[in-house]
Image: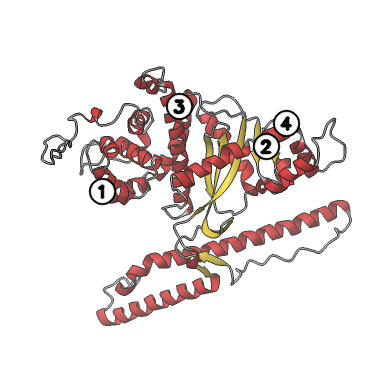
Amino acid sequence: MAYNFRPVNRDQLYLLPPSLRDWLPEDHLAWFLIDAVEQMDLRAFYEKYRADGWGGESYDPTMMVTLLLYAYCVGERSSRRIERLCLEDVAFRVITANQKPDHVTIARFRQRHARELAALFTQVLRLCREAGLGKVGVVALDGTKVKANASLAANRTYDAIRQEVEKMLREAEATDREEDERYGPGRRGDELPEELRHRASRLERLKACKRRLEDEAAREAARQQARIEERKAQEQATGKKRRGRKPKAPDPSVDPAAKANVTDPDSQIMKTRQGFVQGYNAQAVVTEDQLIVAAAVTQDANDVGQLHPMLQQAQANLQAAGVDKPIRAVVADAGYWSEANVKQAPVEGPELFLATRKEWKQRQAWKDAPPPRGRIPKGLSLRERMERKLRTRRGQAIYAKRSQTVEPVFGQIKTVRGADRFLRRGLAACDSEWKLLCLTHNLLKLWRRVRERSATLPFECTVAGLA
C-alpha cells in the first residue's frame, strides 16, 4: 500500500525565500507600518543618541518604533512576548530584519521614549487626513475604566501608610547607628542599610501614597475655603444672608480612613459595571468613522471635569494634523453633564449634546413623549433646554451616533486587542501607553483604508500617496 503524502524534510537548506520581500504579501500590515513610519518625523528619537559614532551599537529607532507599533496593533504589549515573537513570527522578523532585540532593550526603549511615542499621535492623524479619514462634523466623547498594574488588595489607609513609613525609617536609622558604632565614621550615615535596600522602592511608593493623600486633603481644604469666600462675597453684594447650612471651616488634615495603592500610588479605585477595579479613567474623542482625535488618562473617576480639556485637546490635535474643518457637534453621556460645563462652552465652539440622565432613562424619555416642535419656551433652565434639544428629531439623530462611534472603539481596544489593563505604572506612563494604544487603533483604520484603495491602485502607490 503506497501513500501519497507531501515529504517532510527538516534538513532542507532553504525554508524561506532568500529575500525578506517574499516572506509576506505586499499588503501585509507589517509592510504598511514600515512604509508609514518612514514618513514620520523621528528626529526626537534620534536626538537621544550620540551622533559621533562612539559607544556600543544601538538598534535603529526607526526599526524599534515600527516593532512597537506592530506589536500593539496585533495585541502584543509584553516585552518578553515581543522578544520571543522576533524569533518565531515571520512578520516580526521582517520588521526587525532578522535582528533579535531582547525584552530589556524593548522595555527600556518604550520607557525612555514614552513622550516621543505619545507625540506620534498627531503624525498618525496627519496620515489619516491624507487618506480621507476623520469626519469631524460630529464627535463623541466618552471614558472607560482601564485596570492599573496593581491590585485592589494593595490599598492601605493613611494611618497604615504613615505607620509603615515611620517603622521603616526607624529601622534604617537604628541600623545606621549600629553600623556607625561598629565601623566608625567612615560611612556617610545616610545610606540605606543592606537588609533594607530591597525595600527602598517600596518605601518610595509609600511616601508617594502619603504625599498624594496629603495633597488631596490640601486641595479639598482650598476648595472649601473658596466656597466660603464665594458665599461671603454674594452676601456682601446682596446685603442678605444666604439660606441653608453654612459650609464647614476647611480642614487640611488627612482623613485617617483615606486609602491609596502602595503598588501604583497614582491609580484610584474606580467603579465599573462589573464592580470596583484599581485603575484609571481613559478618555477618548472619536469621529463618526471611529478615528480617535484626542486621548488622555485621568485619575478622576467622574467624567464631568474632562469635557472641555478633551475638546481643547481634540481641536489642537486636528489643527496640528492640518484638518481645517471645525468640530460642529459633541455628543456625550450623562457623566459629562453639568450646568457649569454648558455655561463654560464658548459661543463659537461646537454645539453640545449632553445627556442629562442615564442611557436607559434617556431612551425611555424619547418613547414617552413625542419630539417637541415650535419655538423654545421661555423660562426653561439649562437642564430643561438640553433635555428638550435631545428630544427633538435632530437631537435624537445626533445623539444616536454616540453608540456607533466611541463605544465600538473601546471594544476594539479592550476586548479585541486585549488591552484592558495597563502594563506600566504611574499616571504619566499610563497616559503614554493609552495614547500608543489609540494611535495604533488609528493606524489599523488607515491600513484598512489603504487596502480598500489598493483594490483599484497598486498597494505601494496608495501608501506613497500618504506622504
Q: Which mark is nearer the camera, 3 or 1?
A: 3
Of the image marks 2 and 3, the number of the one nearer the N terminus: 2
Check disc 1: other Cα within 10 Å, few if <14, some if 14-19, many if 20+: some
Give the alpha-carbon distance from disc 1 to disc 2, as whole Å.
Answer: 48 Å
The quadrant in which the N terminus is found is top left
Q: Which mark is residue 449?
A: 3
Q: How many marks?
A: 4
Residue that badge 4 annotates? 394
The outermost residue toward the top is: 456
Q: Which mark is residue 338?
A: none
Q: Which mark is nearer the camera, 4 or 1?
A: 4
Q: Quadrant of residue 249?
A: bottom right
Of the image marks 1 and 2, the number of the one nearer the N terminus: 1
Of the image marks 4 and 2, the number of the one nearer the N terminus: 4
The quadrant in which the C terminus is found is top left
Of the image marks 4 and 1, the number of the one nearer the N terminus: 1
Q: Is residue 325 above or below residue 421?
A: above
Q: Secondary structure at mark 4?
A: helix
Q: Which mark is residue 102?
A: 1
Q: Which mark is residue 399?
A: 2
Give the alpha-carbon distance from disc 4 to disc 2, as whole Å.
Answer: 9 Å
Residue 427 x/y as whole percent: 49, 52
In the image, taking residue 221 as reference, residue 154 lies left or right, namely left
Amino acid on which the number 1 mark rests in the picture: Asp
Amino acid on which the number 2 mark rests in the picture: Tyr
Give the alpha-carbon distance from disc 4 to disc 1, as whole Å.
Answer: 55 Å
Q: Which mark is nearer the camera, 1 or 2?
A: 2
Residue occupying image coordinates x 19% and y 30%: 17
The outermost residue toward the front is: 1
Q: Secondary structure at mark 3?
A: helix
Can residue 346 be seen at all in this image of the molecule? no
Give the alpha-carbon distance from disc 3 to disc 1, as whole Å.
Answer: 33 Å
